[in-house]
Amino acid sequence: MNVLSRVAGAAVWVVDVGVGVEINPAGVGSTTGAAGSGAVFRVRKVRPGTADMTRGPAMSREEAERALDVGWSVAMEMIDSGIRLLALGEMGIGNTTAAAAVAAALTGWPEGDLVGLGTGIDPVRRQKKLQAVRRALVVNRPDSSDAVDVLSKVGGLEMAGLAGAALAGAARRVPVLMDGFIASAAVLAAVHIDPRALPYMFASHRSVEPGHGRILRWLGREPLFDLDLRLGEGTGAVLAMPMMEAAARILDEMATFEEAGVSDAED
């Protein structure tokens, strides 16, 4: 992610919303926010990891709301620093499982259509993963009309944070690039919270996770490319940045036929 961000001239903002251990910010890197200048690290830990969602809620509603606020406030800080394009990525353990549960709860789709192989598990482990998603939904009974309830019961701190960041981008009219399955599940939750955010959301790529393509179709977003990525961390979103910039510059800088004095009349 750091290498690709340097290629794209993008700043990396790393936010600890709920890492299970304490991290020393001094060992992470740069604390400046200019594009291409290195990493920015913010400690905004809501709690050290989520609970086992197969036995009860992943977190409390108040914790989910705090994580949403973390994403909102950090995204606002980024925009205030001059950033005009947000790319959403994440790092987490087992979060394709939680993303499948969130998508199933918000859309009503069958869990089997959403659960994939994650980082490359075998079919037997996929069945265990599917059982975990189904058990979590039965145990917690998330309210499909309340995205915050869904995030708190079967989501993750990183998803709630990304949802808050997506809402902040839309509020400030800044385009938001989704990465893979987890980031798109977070945007799905954000759009359920406020449908007015949808026009500001863009799909960078379609990952190998089956649930990702379904979410993109629900959002009405066509990905810019499909490279069978399963990397996460925002890598796909950063790869899409030059394409977004190229499209914007063509609209802004390229002359139309009329402006260039070119006739489109037939001979």
Image (cartoon, helix red, strand yellow):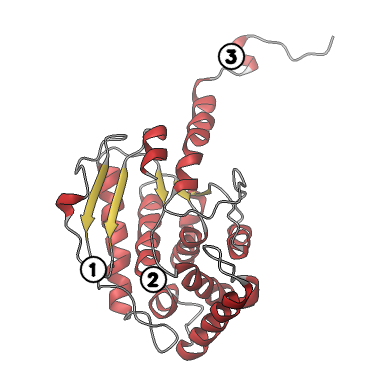
* Amino acid tagged 1: Val
Q: CA distance from mark 2 to mark 1?
A: 16 Å
Q: Label 3 to label 1, Cα distance in Å?
A: 59 Å
Image quadrant holding the C terminus, namely top right
Q: Quadrant of residue 153?
A: bottom left
Q: Which mark is residue 259?
A: 3
Sequence-first disc among 3 and 1: 1
- Point out which mark residue 156 bears: 2
Name the one closer to the observer, 88 or 250. Answer: 88
Q: What is the distance, in whole Å, between disc 2 and disc 3 at their CAs?
A: 51 Å
Residue found 61% across the figure and 55% down from its top: 220
Residue 110 x/y as whole percent: 64, 77
Q: What residue is shown at x 48% (from left), y 52% (from top)? A: 178
Question: Could you say whether the residue bearing mark 3 is in a helix, strand or loop?
Answer: helix
Which amino acid type is shown beneath numbered disc 2? Gly
- Residue 124 percent coordinates (x, y): 61, 77
Residue 108, visible in the rendered structure? no
Q: Which residue is mark 1?
A: 21
**Which secondary structure lies at badge 1?**
loop
Examine the image and state in which quarter residue 256 appears: top right
Nearer mark to the viewer, of 3 and 1: 1
Residue count near mark 2 (Cα–Cα under 10 Å), binned few <14, some 14–19, many ≥20: many
